[in-house]
Amino acid sequence: MSNFRVALLQILPGDTQEQSLAIGLDACRCAKEKGADLALFPEMWNVGYRIPGDPAALHAAAVAPQSGYLRAFAGCARDLGMAVGVTCLEQADPAPRNSLFVYDRHGRLALQYAKVHTCDFGEERCLSRGEGFYTADLDTAAGPVRVGAMICYDREFPESARLLMLQGAEIVLVPNACPMEINRLSQLRARAFENMMGLATCNYPAPWPDCNGGSSAFDGVAYLPDMPGSRDTCLVQAGEEAGVFVADFDMDMLRAYRRSEVHGNAYRRPKLYGELIRAEVREPFVRADRRD
């Protein structure tokens, strides 16, 4: 298989969902012109990560899986022959969810994911949470790619990426809406390195509130036989400005690396990791607003 090209749509939303839909479809067409196999949006694109505080307004802003908003992106994926990873505030019970829908190049739903680690210390406490991590084989013109997803704060838990690795994820899509700085970028680099998989992260540009661009892609390939020392796994790191940025994942190189290197699941000792699934939270990590 040749390269898998991901376009990071680091773009500003509109004032309304209808405006954001039009902006998003235009960005997808731009991604296709750049030769992308998949276009990825920032977090909760239909509302621009603006979460209404009023419950009635929150539900009114959410879209259903069969809504015209999502059908438009499915149709766009089909018409362009390019996968689209579009985000939204999704209708759900008892409250909406922070979700990603990935449509393949035929317009078929390939992967649906709802954010597991919601930011309950902030405005996301009013949202329903996802209950698992999933992967899917994404059909591309060059062959299948096993993709998974995390959303923003999920990135800060090594378990998120680990579970996706164990399910065979080769490329993980990470919609984002927060300031990207050295430590968060280091998290992404680490998740790619330790699991030998690619990560593609898309953020809102500046001057969107609490965002500063910095969309990035890391391919996780830290060593090559003919290269002395360690290799920089960063494929692209955008600046603060709006734009469509592309990352080429060399799937042949990544797959060869996964078959030979020492990370991922090669030498783990799961029988010793029982403490990782203990539900008890002890000081100094007890927080009054934590949900079980």
Image (cartoon, helix red, strand yellow):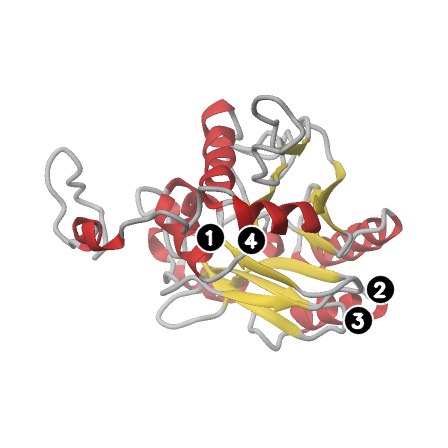
Is there any visible trace of residue 272 in the rendered image? Answer: yes
N-terminal-most mark, 1 or 3: 1
Instruction: Name the amino acid type tagged 3.
Output: Arg
The quadrant holding residue 202 is: top right
N-terminal-most mark, 3 or 4: 4
Instruction: Name the amino acid type tagged 4.
Output: Met
Label 3 CA crowd tier, 10 Å (few <14, some 14–19, many 20+): some
At 69% from the left and 41% from the top, the residue drawn is 12
Label 2 CA crowd tier, 10 Å (few <14, some 14–19, many 20+): some
Q: Does 134 appear above or below 160?
A: below
Tag 2 and tag 3, C-beta contact below 8 Å:
yes
The quadrant holding residue 72 is: bottom right
Measured Cα–Cα span from mark 4 to mark 1? 12 Å
Badge nearest the viewer, 4 or 2: 2
Residue furthest out toward the right: 33
Q: Nearer the viewer, residue 54 or 274?
A: 274
Residue beneath label 4, please?
44
Q: Nearer the viewer, residue 195 or 258?
A: 258
Is there any visible trace of residue 197 in the rendered image? Answer: no
Instruction: Name the amino acid type tagged 2.
Output: Leu
Measured Cα–Cα span from mark 4 to mark 2? 22 Å
Q: In which quadrant will I find the C terminus? A: bottom left
Badge nearest the viewer, 1 or 3: 3
Measured Cα–Cα span from mark 1 to mark 2? 33 Å
Q: Secondary structure at mark 2?
A: helix
Q: Nearer the viewer, residue 115 or 182?
A: 182
Residue beneath label 3, please?
78
